[in-house]
Image (cartoon, helix red, strand yellow):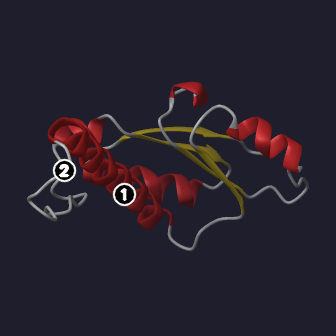
């Protein structure tokens, strides 16, 4: 499984009911890099995964384009979608599920398999 310090972007949806992160703990966790932590779960995890990947890839492309050729005089370029992305780009991403829900794990596994995104999981049965 990937390490948090090696990630370009990490999103954590913490759904534990017995613990609430303090502001100091959140600051310490976010100090590792581009990390978003939310206590709770979004209504559609696959849409969140797709949105994160597409947004990151579009912004990275715009940044490199502007850095290499300067502000583009070409105007707007077509936005990448998850279905138009290169297979190698998709394989570079990893969705890691750590939790106790087999349903969520299966949903994420099937989604990533269908899109060609690396998936890993670590289930606990507390």
The residue located at (8%, 59%) in the rendering is 74
Please state the horizontal and vertical placement of residue 11, each as a whole percent of the image: 57, 49
Please name the residue that numbered disc 2 is placed on.
85
The residue located at (27%, 42%) in the rendering is 90
- State whether residue 125 is above or below residue 103: above
Quarter placement of the C terminus: top right
**Residue 34 quadrant:** top right
Q: In the visual, does 93 lie left or right of 101?
A: left
Q: Nearer the viewer, mark 2 or mark 1?
A: 1
Crowd tier of the residue under label 1, counting other residues whose Cα lies within 10 Å: few below 14, some 14–19, many 20 or above: some
Front residue of this view, candidates 103 and 45: 45
Please state the horizontal and vertical placement of residue 88, each as a whole percent of the image: 20, 35
Q: CA distance from mark 2 to mark 1?
A: 12 Å
The residue located at (50%, 70%) in the rendering is 44
The residue located at (15%, 56%) in the rendering is 84
Tag 1, which secondary structure? helix
Crowd tier of the residue under label 2, counting other residues whose Cα lies within 10 Å: few below 14, some 14–19, many 20 or above: some
Q: Is residue 1 visible?
A: no
Please name the residue that numbered disc 1 is placed on.
55
Tag 2, which secondary structure? loop
Upstream in sequence: badge 2 or badge 1:
1
- In the displayed orientation, state which residue is furthest to the left: 74
Q: In the visual, does 10 lie left or right of 53?
A: right
**Residue 46 quadrant:** bottom left
Front residue of this view, candidates 4 and 69: 69
Please state the horizontal and vertical placement of residue 52, each as a whole percent of the image: 43, 56
- In the displayed orientation, state which residue is furthest to the bottom: 43
């Amino acid at each position: 499984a990937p390490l948090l310090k090696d990630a370009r972007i990490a999103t954590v949806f913490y759904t534990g009911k017995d613990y609430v992160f303090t502001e100091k703990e959140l600051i310490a966790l976010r100090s590792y890099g581009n990390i978003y932590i939310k206590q709770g779960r979004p209504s559609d995890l696959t849409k969140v995964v797709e949105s994160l990947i597409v947004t990151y890839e579009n912004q990275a492309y715009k940044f490199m384009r502007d850095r290499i050729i300067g502000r583009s005089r070409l105007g707007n370029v077509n936005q990448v979608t998850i279905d138009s992305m290169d297979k190698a780009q998709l394989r570079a991403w990893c969705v890691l599920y750590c939790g106790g829900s087999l349903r969520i794990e299966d949903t994420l596994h099937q989604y990533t398999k269908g899109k060609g995104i690396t998936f890993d999981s670590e289930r606990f049965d507390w």
